[in-house]
Image (cartoon, helix red, strand yellow):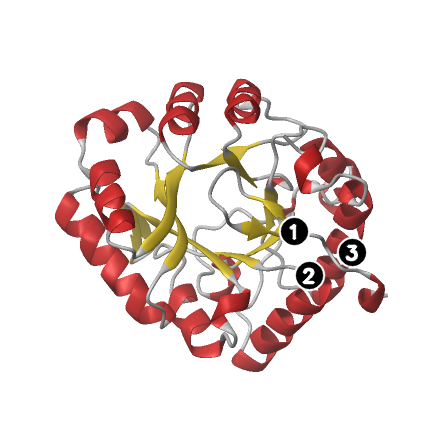
Amino acid sequence: MKKEIMLQTRELGQTGIQVSPLGLGTVKLGRDQQVKYPWSFKIPDDQIVLELLSLSRELGINLLDTAPAYGNSEERLGQLLSYRQDWVIVSKVGEAFEHGQSHFDFTAKTTRKTIETSLRKLKTDYIDVVLVHSDGDDQRVIEQTDVIETLQRLKQEGHIRAIGLSTKTTQGGLWTVENTDVIMATRNTTDHTDDPVLDRALELDKGVVIKKGLQSGHVDTKAGGGGVEEALNYVFSHQAVSCLIAGTINPKHLTQNAQIVEQLTRLIQPSDNR
């Protein structure tokens, strides 16, 4: 079945980056504490990760979502990824996860150090997209810290291709689509908070990556949800959506997700999506 699936890429806003409509979230590759999935899981070994990455390529998935707060996810990707040029890597700044707790730091010094560390761990000289991992107070992060200005400088220096925020508020989301390249927003059948943000992103032709589209697995009927197909249908019903992140480490689930997304997006060419 997987050989019949080949996701077609689309433009990520005005970044010049082509992304698959389904991206692979990698928190489960490096962290199993303080996660909100309905079932426990075991961090996969290298062979399983290699098989998952190979399957992703076969399905046409080219976007990998990682972060320093995802345990050793970045380091594992750096060790296991081949053909770096075939992948779009999205990482983040602002949040670190240590000793079972998240810590936030948006200073210029820490932001630059975080990027330098991520580049080293990922074994690359550039990161395609870097997002600010908001602590929930989007406006304070935007207006009272140096993180955005620092990312802009790092972009000018060639270390980053596009910047944006993973936001928590509508106000922060609207600022993000008006002032940066990419937003990571929330859209699912129970959370419509970011709909005005997506509407604005569509108007401005900005890149939109969706988080929590599958509600961390809670849309699964076995978890009491309405089903994955219904959830994916809803996410892609908004034309602003460039890509949805799914954090599965189950090859069967990944293939099923890709099959549904391909069917939903098959008739929508990138030029029609804006």
The quarter in which the C terminus is drawn is top right
Q: Name the residue under label 1.
A: 9
Residue 38 % position (x, y): 62, 48
Disc on the earlier residue, 2 or 3:
2
Most foreground residue, 254 or 3: 3
139 and 37: which is toward the camera: 139
**Is the residue marked by circle 1 packed among few (<14), some (14-19), or many (20+) residues within 10 Å?**
many
Q: Which of 217 and 145 is in front in this view?
A: 145
* Separation of marks 3 and 1 at Cα, in angstroms: 18 Å
Q: How far apart are marks 2 and 1 (CA)?
A: 8 Å
In terms of secondary structure, where does tag 2 sit?
loop
Q: Is residue 131 shown left or right of residue 206?
A: left
10 Å neighbourhood of mark 2: few (<14), some, or many (≥20)? many
Q: Nearer the viewer, mark 3 or mark 1?
A: 1
Question: Looking at the figure, which quarter contains the N terminus?
Answer: bottom right
Residue pointed to by mark 2: 60
Residue 175 locus on image (x, y percent) = 37, 23
Q: What residue is at 45 percent from the left and 20 percent from the top? A: 170
**Residue on which the image places disc 3:** 256
Find out whether the residues at labels 2 and 1 contact each other: C-beta distance under 8 Å: yes
Q: Which of marks 2 and 1 is in front?
A: 1
Tell whether 12 sits left or right of 66: right
The percent position of residue 126, horizontal first and vertical second, equals 35, 61
Work out whether 157 lies above or below 202.
Answer: below
